[in-house]
Amino acid sequence: MKITERIDYAAAPAAVFAMLTDTDFQVAKCIEAGSERHESAVTPAGDGARVVTQRDLPAHHLPDFARSIVGDTLSVTETYDWSAPASDGGRDGTLVVEVAGAPVALRAKVRLVPSASSTAMTIDGDLKASIPLLGGKVEKAAAPAVVDAIHLEGRTGARWLADRV
């Protein structure tokens, strides 16, 4: 299932990248999402970075058939790999979101796209559930939660930047 979303931040790409690679921001977005447990690691990679966040989320909002696959808790690992900045400050990267114990993953290209007074973070990828006969049903059930998580990250980021930039 195709997932295409955009988050607009009222800050320059360098400030947005600094936020996205700040472990305190990663913790803040986990708390906002209602995680029961979380950890985050940021590793510089040349002029880019790798950000890995693991969190346990309650699965009570999922349909019964999906909860029968993942249980009462979703253990989610989110990995962003960011490139060095382009001449305009924008960046490209990848995002992989995986659920432990479930054959469900989001694989996406991400971009920080600068404009005159803001930066758009675009996410363009595919949500796949590799479950015979039920894959499409699981993807449709999971997609709203994935999109909601993206929007929640955007709201958390907007508040973070407003307090710091």
Image (cartoon, rainbow, N blue to C red):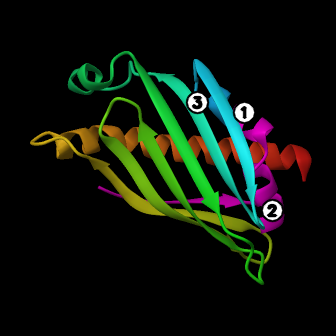
Answer with left or right where residue 88 lies relative to residue 104: right
Q: Secondary structure at mark 3?
A: loop
User: Residue 152 sits in which quadrant?
Assistant: top right
- Quarter of the picture containing the N terminus is bottom left
80 in relation to 116, above or below = above
Q: Amino acid at mark 1?
A: Ala
Q: CA distance from mark 2 to mark 1?
A: 19 Å
Closer to the camera, 124 or 147? 124
Residue at image point 78% right, 77% down: 116
Closer to the camera, 16 or 144? 16
Specify the segment rendered in magenta: 1-28
Where's residue 63, x and y in %?
A: 27, 25
Q: Residues within 10 Å of mark 1 (few under 14, many from 20)?
A: some
Question: Does the magenta segment cover residue 15?
Answer: yes
Disc 1 designates what residue? 28
Q: Residues within 10 Å of mark 3 (few under 14, many from 20)?
A: some
